[in-house]
Image (cartoon, grey):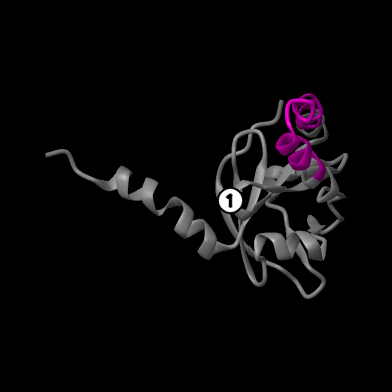
Amino acid sequence: MARFFGRYEHSLDLKGRIILPAKFRSSFEHGGYLTQYYDRCLALWTPESFEEQMEARETAQDLSPEERNMARLWSSGTAEVDVDKQGRIAIPQHLRGFARLEGDVLVHGAIERVELWNPEVWSQKVEPAERALTQEES
């Protein structure tokens, strides 16, 4: 199973594409799946990890109406993507809107997936954790 780590700063081009860091590309040579994810980011899954996510959502949707709606939202917002010869992936407009991606995009590894973030949203989300890391012991 592929594991992803590291942080990269890229920009969307005029067609809504982003360069996938070279370090990540080999895991997506057979394509990938781009989904809406928690905290207003996008998750890029390898085909194997995506299949695991699909199975988990399929099982969970029978548990409650809320889980059914999450499964519906997740699957309807998913896009199959390919990495082109220049190492770019196209991000559909509805996913760019969900994640508020407009110019700069933070691409980072998140263990079993790659996440794409609006840098401002990312900063707001991780600020409490960064403060905790930088506090000195008394």
Q: Residue at x 80, y 66 (%)?
A: 93
Identified by mark 1, the residue type is: Asp
The quarter of the rendered structure image containing the C terminus is top left
The answer to whether 4 is drawn above or below residue 108 in the figure is above
Q: How many marks?
A: 1
Q: Residue at x 65, y 65 (%)?
A: 100
The quarter of the rendered structure image containing the N terminus is top right
Position of residue 85 measured from the top left corner of the image (x, y, whole percent): 86, 56
The answer to whether residue 18 is magenta is no
Q: Which residue is mark 1?
A: 39
Q: Residue at x 28, y 47 (%)?
A: 134
Q: Which residues are magenta?
A: 52-72
Question: Residue 92 lies in what quarter of the image?
Answer: bottom right
Question: Residue 5 lies in what quarter of the image?
Answer: top right
The reply, left or right, for residue 52 in relation to residue 126 is: right
In the picture as drawn, the residue positioned furthest to the front comes out as: 65
